[in-house]
Image: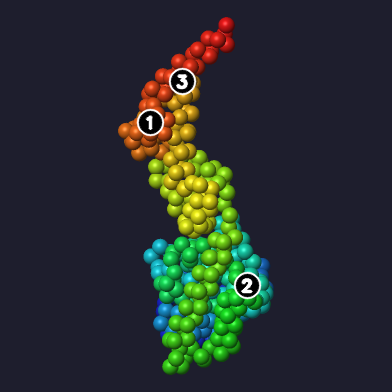
Amino acid sequence: MQKALLWNWAGVQAGVARSIADWQQMMGLRPVEFWHYADQQAARFYAQHHTVVLDDVMVSRMSTAAHHVQRPVRTDAESYVQIGLQLRGWSNAYQGARQVVSRPGDLIVFSTDVDFRVDLSEGMGCVLFLLPARALGLSDEVIRKQSLAVIRGDAGLGLLMARTLGTLGDDLATLTGRGATRVVSSMASLAAAMLLREAEQRDAITSVGIEDVCGFIDAHLGDSSLTAQRVADAHFIALRTLQYQLQREGTTVSRLIRERRLDRARRDIGDPHDTRPIAEMAKACGFASPAHFSREFKQAYGVSPSDYRRSRAATTGSVTTRTAT
């Protein structure tokens, strides 16, 4: 595997590579780091590109032989977003257990804040638009949700973006004139509108049941830092969407967390076989302090935790006696 060196430049470049090492060196012109490598048994490698870099934005048309691209996580680099229009062949992208396939006419989105790998088919052709995330003016949440997203290029804003990238790919000289900065600014605005629209549509069709939320809360009750935002992130939806869905059920995330913690604590305290101190039970259920837990418990059940334990012990004892007799 050859590793790219980072360096920036401005202007137009074109080139043909006859080896993966040459291609890696050419791709070092990008302001973020990618690794390119090919299978050992692969046939003779070839690739070509025609690229324009304007300030910190890049538009490139390229075609390559089959190989792999990997993005390592770099916490010290600025966040970039890459939008690619698939012209020929296919791209198979992986991020953790997630996998998507991009085919001709599709747009595929990557955030450089996450690690990913892309397998490119023989004869793959594409147009890439790489720009800083800050240029989009979108929240980190929206950008994160759209990373590794495949957007259809035949309808809506996806169609406008696909046509724009396709046209620029055919005539990159458009980005070398006096109006190039305005063109790039318009492309960034279009990209932002497309990603925001995709995020809204995803939120609209995502439905998380209250059982899913309760299951996640139950699995993380002992975490005192459990928040509504963390629950939303775990289900890959916006916080406002989760809040709206639970509102229709007559509850909120915070209320569910409180109720589930109290219910677990009540069951533990009432278990005659559980001899842990009440303070230990409260901590295991995510309460910040015994005093806070005692107040919450009494407000919910009308008795203190210690009184509840004594009453349950007495009840259990009488039942046991009756059963024995």
CB atoms of marks 2 and 3 within 8 Å: no
Left/right of residue 217 with respect to residue 279 in the rendered view: right
Amino acid found under the numbered disc labelled 3 = Arg
Q: 215 or 276: nearer the eye?
A: 215
Residue at numbered disc 2: 152
Q: Is residue 285 left or right of residue 167?
A: left
Where is residue 129 drawn, in percent x and y?
52, 78
Q: Is residue 285 left or right of residue 21?
A: left
Outermost residue to the bottom: 178
Q: Residues within 10 Å of mark 3 (few under 14, many from 20)?
A: some
Residue that numbered label 3 is attached to = 312
Which quadrant holds residue 17? bottom right
Distance Cα–Cα, label 2 vs label 1: 55 Å
Other residues around mark 2 within 10 Å, as few (<14) / some (14–19) / many (≥20): many
Q: Foreground: 201 or 165?
A: 201
Badge 1 density bin: few <14, some 14–19, many ≥20, Cα 10 Å: some
